Amino acid sequence: MDTRIIFHQSVDELKKALLRMGGLVEESISKAVESLSSLDEGLAREIVAKDDVIDELMLGVEESCLRLIALQQPMASDLRLIGMALKIATDLERIGDHAVDIAKITIRLSGEELIKPLEDIPRMALLVKNMLHESLLAFTEGDIHRAAALAEKDDEVDKLYSILMTEIIGLMSQDLIRNRQLSHLMFVAHYLERVADHATNIGEGVIYMVTGKRKDLNI
Amino acid sequence: MDTRIIFHQSVDELKKALLRMGGLVEESISKAVESLSSLDEGLAREIVAKDDVIDELMLGVEESCLRLIALQQPMASDLRLIGMALKIATDLERIGDHAVDIAKITIRLSGEELIKPLEDIPRMALLVKNMLHESLLAFTEGDIHRAAALAEKDDEVDKLYSILMTEIIGLMSQDLIRNRQLSHLMFVAHYLERVADHATNIGEGVIYMVTGKRKDLNI
């Protein structure tokens, strides 16, 4: 068979594997925040356990990428595409880790009562989940407009994050238990903000992949 | 010239580039914590500016790795080595980002006075800088004992981190300005702890690179 055809089939499989990994990671983020909202320890433990599956998928994607480069010796834009797939796999794995970070906070807080019902954190989670989804579509479709829109959405997340942090800091008191919970919530907000950064990174990478130019670096 | 010789020369250059990048990143972490201890905004801005150099080095390493794989089609342990170099470049770049995160906190706090002189944070910084150094040596020498020792050092860092967090949470009060500073210090401790995790990741990767076995995953 023509090596171009084999290459394109392999790239399609790679994209599918990344979308599957992305789906799992999106689910982990949703469920992690859900577990926190309801302080559901069981759900949190499920997320921690499922992280191995995400790690396994990452190793598979990495191996496929390295093998594809070694066997097909792709040049220019093809090489950029595979380099990008490698980076996305790393970003997704890190996002999965942040879901686990949040789930572990649920486990630590379980048994306590939340100082107040969570509102902004679930809202932030929805936004970042949407960004993640968009970033993967931008990659699979090579859509630079979709990719560029992520930076704006990231600004929105950053604003929400900043509001949330100020609110949490204002709720601190002399009460150790209360402060402990609030500091955990602070980190949850931080992890979600980092997820948005990862999605934005993927967006910047897609622009480079498609255009061959890096807009984010002064080099 | 023999392709093996070319390959080994390229690998040596790759290692040198990673060590150079590692040296810069170690320096950034030291200086970031130094800037925080003395609330030296000028030093903090230097670190932020220098991050572009680290990013540039990362792109160079990545390109060399992908090109090396495409041109030399390495198999088994050689492919693992290059895959590892790629991962280390990403880890180093993230560590550089954490130095910037810390420097930005210095910039935010400049003009204030520190609630108390920093002690545990500089101590933690020394430990993680040492871990980072050891992780890179483990890679360049393929030294699995050095690599395995990193997990123990990481436990030490985790303990110090936990002590620090409890202390910071205990210092919280009704005072907004004070809480703002304390929450920033909380994140500094968190970033340093993450640096130690990156060094530990590098260690685990080196063990896989040398032995071909993954000890950290149940797969």
Image (spheres, coloured by chain):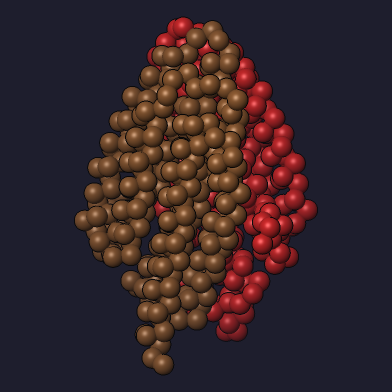
Chain colours: A brown, B red
Identify the residue at the far right of this view. Answer: B145
Residue plotted at (29% across, 59% down): A138
Question: Where does the image place residue B60, in percent across and percent down from the top left?
Answer: 44, 60
Q: Nearer the viewer, residue A219 or A79?
A: A79
Residue plotted at (27% across, 54% down): A147
Question: Where does the image place residue B179, in percent across and percent down from the top left?
Answer: 47, 14
For the N terminus of chain A, the quadrant is bottom left
| Residue B92 in view in this figure | no
Quarter assignment of residue A127: top left
Q: Nearer the viewer, residue A49 or B132?
A: A49
Location of residue B94 with respect to B205 vertically, above or below = above
Residue plotted at (53% across, 17% down): A179
Question: Where does the image place residue A182, in percent across and percent down from the top left?
Answer: 49, 21
Location of residue A209 with respect to B200 vertically, above or below = below
Residue plotted at (49% across, 32% down): A38
Question: Where does the image place residue B86, in percent across and percent down from the top left?
Answer: 53, 60
Quarter assignment of residue A189: top left
Q: Nearer the viewer, residue B52 or B135?
A: B135
Location of residue B18 with respect to A118 vertically, above or below = below
| Residue B144 in view in this figure | yes
Identify the residue at the far bottom of this view. Answer: A1
Location of residue A152 with respect to B144 vertically, above or below = above
